Image (cartoon, grey):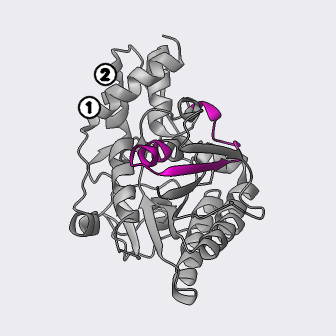
Amino acid sequence: MPISVVTGGAGFLGSHLCDRLVAEGHSVVCIDNLITGSTANVAHLAGNPQFKFIQYDVTNYLFVDGSVDYIFHFASPASPIDYLKFPIQTLKVGSLGTHKALGLAKAKNARFLLASTSEVYGDPLLHPQPESYWGNVNPVGPRGVYDEAKRFAEAMTVAYHRYHKLETRIVRIFNTYGERMRIEDGRAIPAFMSQALRGEKITVFGDGKQTRSVCYVSDLIEGIYRLMMSDYALPMNIGNPEEITMKGLAEEIVQLTGSKSTIVYKPLPEDDPKVRQPDISIARQVLHWEPRVKREEGLRKTMEYFQKELAL
């Protein structure tokens, strides 16, 4: 039975990854300090002999008993509201946490996958964004703590690959949504969805013409799993290339929920990207992967989850 370690495993993406690994027959060690994750996300795995949860901060010395085959490093605050609240922790988990996780991979001779982000491209001047694009990032802006933490994490991962010959994978994750997102996450879909379901005004920043490309969580996890099991060591975009404006997304959610909410506009936050769309040519070619879940279907599943969370 393969043994996988998932740092940040009680988070939104990490918990879905734990589910997938257990389903694939892996024994999973989930490590999370719970500053943004929640045990509720993995409660259904409690008592499963294939699953073990450890509450721990991976910026400290990281030790796991026995053999380890795969390490998925997902530990990090991942939404603007979180990394603005926890700027130092975000930088530490991207640097020290990545170093500790890579050290464990080296000690165990395990394959390592870094959960990086489309934020390494910053506010991009090239559209859509291919992996070869170096980005347009403000290192001292409010988003720099996350952007630069992930850019540093990529550099360290590649250094371990080149210097220590460690097997490494890097996934650049684009906007993802689905069940287990926190209502107060601060990202667009949870914000729009909860506001619409409560009948509140929906807050769109800027003029609403800025774009995102949103990928349903099951599609993302499929791509990540395929990447880990592939032989591809360079960074790879995983996301849905279907682009939509924020105004358009808000309108879709209002229609889906049957809400009478109206849209209000507020100033665009500093360094907020104007466009975001992955070029997934490499994922298509190497992994034979592309998203399958239509936005309407994914949003409906997400809405049903939020209805339960809001007890509506």
The residue carrying mark 1 is 296
Residue with the most extreme bottom position = 163
> Could you tell me which residue is drawn at 53 percent across and 20 percent down?
309
Q: Which numbered dot is residue 238?
A: none
- Observer-nearest residue: 91 or 128? 91
Tag 1: amino acid = Glu
Mark with earlier residue (2, 1):
2
Q: Which numbered dot is residue 256?
A: 2
The x, y position of residue 125, in whole percent, is 39, 68
> Could you tell me which residue is drawn at 35 percent across and 27 percent down?
301
- Magenta segment: does it hold 86? no
What segment is highlighted magenta in the picture? 16-40
Q: Residues within 10 Å of mark 2 (few under 14, many from 20)?
A: some
- Depth check, mark 2 against mark 1: the one in front is 1
- Magenta segment: does it hold 37? yes
- Observer-nearest residue: 128 or 219? 219
Q: Is residue 158 above or below residue 214?
A: below
| Kind of element beneath mark 1 | helix
